[in-house]
Image (tube, rainbow, N blue to C red):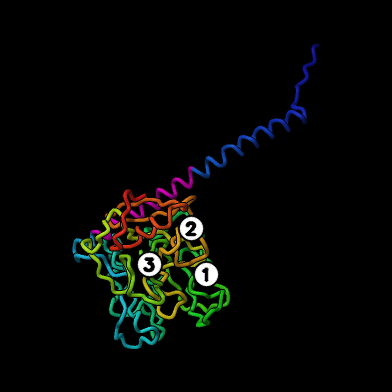
Amino acid sequence: MVSRQTRAFTLVELLVVIAIIGVLVGLLLPAVQAARESARRSSCSNNMRQLGLAMHHYHDHAKRFPSGWIGSSSAAGAVADEDEQPGWGWASRLLPQIEAGPLYDRIDFRSPVFDPVGADVHAEVRRSVIATFLCPSDTRGPTEVAGVFGIGKESGEEGHEEHDHHFHAVDGGDLETLCEVAKSNYVGMYGWQHEVDDEPAAGDGILFRNSRVSVKDVTDGTSKTILLGERSSRLGCSTWAGVIAGAEVMRSRVVGVGDHVPNTGEHFDDFTSGHHGGVQFVYADGSCRLLSDSIDETVYHALCTRAGGEVVADAP
């Protein structure tokens, strides 16, 4: 009788197979991650295109783009930063155009986004997370939970580095939470030659306090003027609702300043993203394009103004 022996893998052979699998995984993982990021970036681009179309739909009816945010109100009980009341931002005006009409109908635009005297008013509206305003590549903000974050109360400490207007995290830390609000990764272009906290109505871009800019005012050309851009949540969250009076860097939550090239430095009011190598922007003609982190600063500044008279032969 012939005995048959079953040959098993040796330890060396198993280790070789495991090593080969490890190498293959190591080669495939970056490609998988790149494919996923490509899908996320495409989704973000689609969101921004929707906002660009919504902006133009609004313009078709109002003959101008929405204001960056609405200031100056005599709303009863409003006690903080009267010049910034009621505060509703450009994105809140687009809700009917992005299939959020029922939420839009719940807003009393004569009342503040947040009033400490009546904190429950608009509370559910403020906390409403809208997918169109979110970039899939974004990271979670310092106080964010599922798209809702605790916006920090203004510290009121001049020169305090941790709570400086532009640097480091603007939420969390030892800041008291003023209220909870839904985040957004897309903010309007204020311009670059002024600081929004110092001169909120002096923006040389398209969106600022009580702005009423129309296409005819964009003399630099709609294809060469930025309308909206991305803002990551790494240093703190922005919001679609508008200016929350009494909040830390309240104006920079709805608009960005283009004084620094995208994705550089530690400035909250800059335009930043979770995408590799650049930030996506919507132009005044409704198109969406990614600008490289290495864009020439002079060219970038020219794209941030609506009527600066700069010459940009071919917008990136």
Residue 286, position as x, y percentages in the image = 28, 54
**Which residue does the numbered mark 3 point to in the structure image?**
240
Give the amino acid at mark 3. Answer: Trp
Is there CB contact under 8 Å for labels 3 and 2? no
**Prevailing SS of the magenta stretch:** helix
Give the numbered dot on residue 33: none
| Residue beneath the point at 45% across and 77% down | 247
Give the foreground label among 3 and 1: 1
Q: Residue at x 45, y 59 (%)?
A: 261
Task: Identify residue for label 1.
Answer: 167
In this rendering, is residue 288 above or below 196?
A: above
First along the sequence among labels 3 and 2: 3
Asked whether 182 falls inside the magenta stretch, the response is no
Q: Determine if residue 242 is in view.
A: yes
Measuring from the top left, give residue 161's x and y in whole percent: 56, 75
Question: Which of 204/86 is in front?
Answer: 204
The residue to which callout 2 is attached is 263
Can you tell which of label 3 and label 2 is closer to the viewer? 2
Residue 89 shows in this picture: no
Amino acid at circle 2? Asn
Residues drawn in magenta: 35-56
What secondary structure is marked by label 3?
A: loop
Labelled pair 3, 1 in contact (Cβ < 8 Å): no
**Badge 3: residue crowd in 10 Å (few <14, some 14–19, many ≥20):** many
Residue at 50% across / 77% down in the picture? 177
